[in-house]
Image (tube, helix red, strand yellow):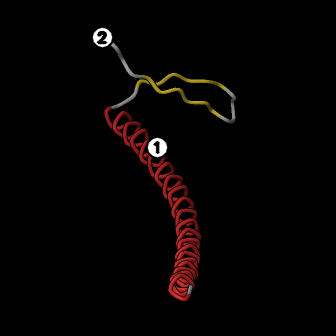
Amino acid sequence: MLTCVKLVIDPELSKLYILPMSNIDKKEEMEQIDLHKLEGRVEELIHQCSELGEENRSLRAQQEKLVTERAALIEKTELARTRVEAMITRLKALESGT
């Protein structure tokens, strides 16, 4: 049969004592372990939230840049279309005039 023990150091005498653990001590120890696990998970979630927030900011900046570039390209395309249509009109006028 396995018996749980608790190690206790007496600070005044600097001696180590091995004491049997009561059910209450075992329960408290399990609660402490669960609490440490929970703390670890919460810290991990905080870290992930921070990383996701930074990634979100980066993606929003990238999206804004791409939207601006797209608008500039649309403007250039419209300008090119206008110029090509003007050239076609002039070519047709030259062709009709000769």
Amino acid type, callout 2? Met
Residue 60: image location, x then y, percent? 53, 68
- Looking at the rendered image, the quarter that the N terminus falls into is top left
Residue 53: image location, x then y, percent? 52, 62
Considering only vertical position in the picture, is 10 above or below 52? above
Is residue 51 rendered to the left or right of residue 26? right
Is residue 16 rendered to the left or right of residue 81? right
Specify whether residue 78 is in view. Answer: no
Distance from the alpha carbon under mark 1 to that under mark 2: 28 Å
Considering only vertical position in the picture, is 52 above or below 4? below
User: Farthest residue toward the top?
Assistant: 1
Residue visible at 55% across and 85% down in the picture: 86
- Looking at the rendered image, the quarter that the C terminus falls into is bottom right
Residue 17: image location, x then y, percent? 56, 24
Residue visible at 55% across and 78% down in the picture: 84
For mark 1, give the secondary structure. helix
The reply to whether callout 1 and callout 2 are in contact (CB within 8 Å) is no
Q: Nearer the viewer, residue 76 or 49?
A: 76
User: Mark 2, residues whose alpha carbon is within 10 Å: few (<14), some, or many (≥20)?
Assistant: few
Which residue corresponds to mark 2?
A: 1
Is residue 35 rendered to the left or right of residue 14? left
Specify whether residue 55 is in view. Answer: yes
Q: Earlier in the sequence, mark 1 or mark 2?
A: 2
Considering only vertical position in the picture, is 78 above or below 55? below
User: Mark 1, residues whose alpha carbon is within 10 Å: few (<14), some, or many (≥20)?
Assistant: few
For mark 2, give the secondary structure. loop
Residue visible at 50% across and 86% down in the picture: 96
Amino acid type, callout 1? His
Which residue corresponds to mark 1?
A: 36
Considering only vertical position in the picture, is 22 above or below 38? above
| Total numbered circles | 2
